[in-house]
């Protein structure tokens, strides 16, 4: 019978056999690949659309194996619109950011908008809200009953990253029950093991059920994961550069690449609009020495197989969803033409389809509750009595990585207070509770941003509890920044010399905007520039800022309960 669409005379990139086969046609019917062969002219009827590939490479649509839509500051619809021109046709998303703010209802909103899109967006049910019980307070909590309910939804593909790895290792009944509900449904359990200990605790974590992990930062991490039967997910996000340090497990040690997956984890809108998405990750892997066909496997068939979808997506083979990209070069990977489910969705870098929006309710737009107007005195750090100097625990930012360092610095005590010290790159960090309106403020110290002069930066994106996090050198501006975010219902604001110099409104859950990606990206780009104007030279420092409250990644973090020593999963004191 005639096909709906035939792509003629292209080079078929087969990720099953790792071959490039020139002079092939692709026939597509009802949104699926019907046939691939040297001459499919017989499938061309009077109503068949014909695309001349003219020798271009025909590669499967790219898959992101682990990511958070909220990190793009965009809703699923706007995120899809941003990445489709870059060749991403499948995403496996974990909306645990919104789960911490709005609970299961928020996850359902993300899930429903995801299913409306012209590309494949599969949702993982968040597993850890809070990420570390007893060390932070979230807007909502998630438990085994929520997981069991979500497993019945049509777009749920598995359980989101199991961040509470100490709980799994120690046999937490709640964590194991969530894993059990997922496995009972025959779905995949996502992992998150952010510890350098690859001995008994790591083996216990794997035994608990998580099937993949994206927290590796070294070759040894990648090797340990695949040897224990996990898929090693190598990430390149806006600020996480963990591909180069791990891909040597393939390029130099020769491990089987089919157990490795590429992902982004967190990409903000500026990266998506200006640099790309999974095409950027594949290009980076190739630049790090990976064979182009292996890199493509890691962004297509490997991902599909891991989630049990090898018969649906991830390759250009009969019966699969017709997701295909035309490109002129396998190394630089220009995305010339994108087809998803048999329909053209982007050409020459421009989207050609609509990405429908969910009607986000007022409950999702009214989530920032400080409880009172904050003042400079709320951000005073009082020193111990009758001393002129104190040893303080200081959060040390590590460029391009998620972990922090637990620094110990000698700080002077003047008039009973500890002051920021920009000359030594020591700023103040504060966390303002924003879910229950308690007005609580926790103060501590952070180093690594390089801020100079009077400034403050505040954000309601503060993984994973998403309270308000503020870094600054001036208490008046820290208070002004916090109050501004209360006024606009969430987002990011940067202040310098007493004035606001950048703002990114994020009215949905204080995490996302439903404005077009280019508009959000322009504001995000201005925000990054504003941080640089305040002295910051870190690559994508905003991502570092937003993770300072992530109490499941070592070594030192801040929460609404105080400073957290993540090496011990215990609260700790600011001063020794």
Image (cartoon, helix red, strand yellow):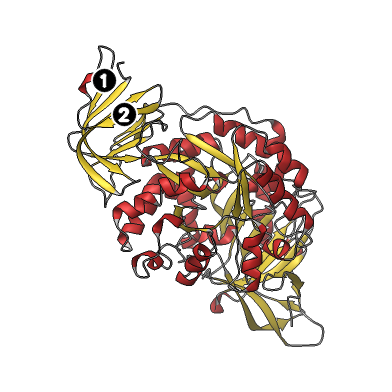
- Depth check: 150 or 304 in front? 304
Q: Residue at x 37, y 50 (%)?
A: 297
Question: Is 122 drawn above or below residue 442 in the view shown?
Answer: above
**Would residue 46 appear left or right of 75 to someone viewing this image?**
left
Q: Quadrant of the C terminus?
A: bottom right
Question: Is 53 drawn above or below residue 93 in the view shown?
Answer: above
Residue 122 placement (x, y as % from top left) = 55, 39
User: Nearer the N terminus, badge 2 or badge 1?
Assistant: 2
Residue hosting label 1: 43
Q: Residue at x 60, y 65 (%)?
A: 194
Q: Secondary structure at mark 1?
A: helix
**Would residue 282 appear left or right of 242 to someone viewing this image?**
left
Question: Is 217 drawn above or below residue 326 in the view shown?
Answer: below
User: How dense is the environment of label 2, judged by Cα within 10 Å: few (below 14), some, or many (20 and up)?
Assistant: some
Question: Is 437 drawn above or below residue 393 in the view shown?
Answer: above
**Would residue 72 appear left or right of 300 to someone viewing this image?**
right
Q: Quadrant of the N terminus?
A: top left
Q: Is residue 459 visible?
A: yes
Q: Secondary structure at mark 2?
A: strand
Q: Quadrant of residue 47?
A: top left
Give the total of numbered labels: 2
Question: Do callouts 2 and 1 mark residues in contact (Cβ within 8 Å)?
Answer: yes
Q: Residue at x 54, y 69 (%)?
A: 453
Residue 450 placement (x, y as % from top left) = 51, 71
Q: Quadrant of residue 204?
A: bottom right
- Depth check: 22 or 405 in front? 22
- Depth check: 523 or 45 in front? 45
Residue hosting label 2: 35
Q: Is residue 275 visible?
A: no
């Amino acid at each position: 019978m005639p096909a709906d669409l035939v792509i003629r005379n292209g080079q078929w990139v087969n990720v099953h056999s790792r071959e490039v086969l020139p002079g092939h046609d692709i026939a597509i019917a009802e949104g699926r690949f019907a046939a691939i062969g040297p001459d499919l002219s017989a499938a061309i009827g009077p109503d068949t659309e014909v695309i001349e590939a003219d020798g271009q490479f025909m590669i499967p649509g790219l898959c992101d194996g682990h990511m958070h839509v909220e990190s793009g500051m965009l809703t699923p619809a706007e995120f899809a619109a941003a990445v489709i021109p870059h060749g991403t046709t499948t995403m496996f998303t974990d909306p645990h950011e919104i789960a911490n703010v709005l609970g299961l209802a928020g996850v359902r909103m993300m899930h429903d908008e995801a299913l409306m899109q012209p590309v494949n967006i599969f949702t993982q049910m968040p597993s850890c809200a809070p990420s570390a019980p007893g060390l932070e307070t979230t807007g909502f909590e998630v438990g085994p009953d929520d997981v069991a309910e979500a497993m019945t939804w049509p777009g749920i593909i598995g359980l989101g990253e199991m961040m509470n790895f100490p709980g799994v290792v120690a046999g937490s009944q709640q964590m194991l029950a969530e894993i059990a509900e997922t496995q009972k449904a025959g779905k995949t359990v996502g992992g998150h093991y952010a510890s350098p200990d690859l001995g008994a605790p790591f083996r216990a974590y794997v035994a608990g059920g998580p099937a993949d992990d994206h927290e590796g930062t070294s070759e040894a991490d990648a090797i340990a994961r695949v040897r224990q039967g996990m898929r090693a997910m190598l990430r390149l996000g806006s600020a996480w550069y963990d591909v180069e340090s791990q891909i040597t497990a393939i390029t130099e040690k020769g491990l089987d690449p089919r157990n490795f997956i590429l992902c982004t984890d967190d990409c903000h809108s500026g990266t998506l609009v200006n640099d790309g998405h999974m095409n950027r990750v594949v290009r980076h892997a190739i630049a790090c020495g990976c064979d182009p066909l292996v890199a493509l496997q890691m962004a297509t068939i490997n991902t599909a197989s891991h989630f049990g979808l090898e018969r649906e997506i991830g390759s250009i083979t009969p019966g699969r969803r017709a997701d295909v990209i035309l490109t002129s070069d396998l190394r630089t990977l220009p995305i010339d033409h994108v087809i998803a489910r048999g329909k053209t969705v982007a050409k020459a870098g421009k989207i050609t389809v609509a990405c429908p929006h969910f009607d986000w309710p007022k409950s999702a737009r009214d989530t920032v509750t400080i409880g009172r107007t904050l003042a400079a005195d709320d951000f005073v750090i009082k020193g111990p009595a009758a001393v002129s100097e104190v040893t303080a625990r200081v959060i040390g930012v590590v460029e391009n990585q998620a972990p922090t360092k637990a620094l110990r610095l000698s700080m002077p005590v003047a008039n009973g207070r500890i002051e920021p010290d920009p000359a030594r790159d020591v700023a103040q960090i504060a966390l303002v509770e924003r879910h229950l309106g308690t007005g609580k403020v926790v103060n501590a110290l952070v180093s690594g941003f390089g801020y100079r002069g009077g400034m403050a930066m505040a954000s309601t994106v503060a993984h994973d509890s998403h309270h308000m996090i503020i870094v600054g050198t001036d208490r008046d501006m820290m208070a002004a920044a916090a109050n501004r975010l209360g006024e606009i219902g969430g987002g990011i604001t940067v202040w310098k010399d007493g004035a606001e110099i950048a703002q990114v409104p994020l009215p949905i859950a204080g995490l996302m905007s439903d404005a077009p990606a280019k508009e959000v990206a322009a504001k995000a780009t201005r925000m990054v520039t504003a941080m640089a104007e305040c002295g910051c030279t870190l690559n994508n420092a905003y991502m570092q800022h937003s993770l300072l409250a992530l109490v499941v990644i070592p070594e030192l973090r801040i929460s609404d309960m105080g400073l957290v020593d993540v090496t011990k999963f215990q609260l700790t004191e600011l001063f020794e």
